[in-house]
Amino acid sequence: MPRGGVLDTAIICGSIDNVENAQLQHAFELAGLRCAMMLPEEVAIGVSLNHAFEHDKIDLDAIPGFIVRGIGITTLTKSFFRLDVLYSLEQRGKTLINSARATEMAMNKTLASVTIDSAGIPTPATVVTENLNHALAAFDRLGGDVVIKPVYGSRGTGMFRIQDKGVAEHLLIELFRNGCAFYIQQYHPWSAPGGIEAKHPFDVRIIVIGDEIAGSMMRESPSDAQWKTNVHQGAMPRPYSPGNEEIELALKAAKSLRLEIAGVDLLHSSLTGSWIVLEANCAPGWTGLSKASNTDIPARIVDYYRRKLKC
């Protein structure tokens, strides 16, 4: 328990059992900053009361800043409330890294894709709709090879690559019956530019902290049959030093989404012959990166927090 119950920061997260969140908390403590983890569902927002926020164990009103590592997966109504917690903290003068708006934009694949595209950043052609006719037409419109993703999701869960029109129609109709919105993206086959050795599908993850590149890695699938490159889906992390093009795209993507901490995923596309941005994560993990690099991401986050809040 922190001395006197007063904290220097808290990590807002979806799970207090997450290993990376525990590593970040430990990094704060090593730097002499008192830190706790908190779940947004544990908070009550007060209006016209002595205390702006209520929490059973933490004095939130006394904390100057928070690191946002997620809000958890739950119902739509509760998701709105958890975002309200973030916005309310900011309204009360607290510093959030990442901000409520940045977190909201990055969590929503639709808004993130539109924002990245509007910034002039190359990204896959995508159709997002809840209209079944538009969704069915998107298969041909996007070249007959598509990836269907949940609007909210991570780690490659719930993603399907479809190359057969009949299969696409069956899946889309089932999703429609279950009340889902459709996020349908053109599939880009990978290619390896000069200097990169890769035998199987791969992408590049670049960690951005502030306006600097904090770390990077390749993620290569175990076989040609596995098109997903998420480490949690079996991809192998490998050391990688990004070139100027990848660095510029990663920084530009993070900035477009107002992300101070971001994990930007890039693919070298055989369709375009160049790098494209697949997505930007507002709470990137570093377990895979730690296997491919000696970069201490938790320490870099703590250093950024201390410089921003001057503590």
Image (cartoon, rainbow, N blue to C red):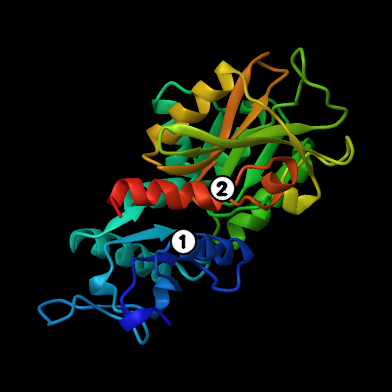
Q: Residue at x 43, y 48 (%)?
A: 303
Q: Secondary structure at mark 1?
A: helix
> Does 153 sit left or right of 260 as displayed?
right
Q: Disc 1 marks which residue? A: 28
- Mark 1: give few (<14), some (14-19) or many (20+) Cα within 10 Å: many
Q: Nearer the viewer, mark 2 or mark 1?
A: 1
Q: Quadrant of the C terminus?
A: bottom left
For disc 2, the marked residue is 297
Q: Quadrant of residue 205?
A: top right
Which kind of residue does numbered mark 1 sit on? Answer: Phe
Q: Residue 219's spot in the image, x, y percent?
A: 74, 38
Q: Residues within 10 Å of mark 2 (few under 14, many from 20)?
A: many
Which x, y percent locates residue 183? 56, 44
Is residue 190 left or right of 214 when viewed as pictured? right
Query: Image point 84% across, 42% down: which residue?
Result: 226
Q: CA distance from mark 2 to mark 1?
A: 12 Å
In the picture provided, is 46 more to the left or to the right than 216? left
Depicted 61 relative to depicted 219: above or below: below
Identified at 74% across, 15% down, the residue is 193
Residue flagged by tag 2: what amino acid is it?
Ile
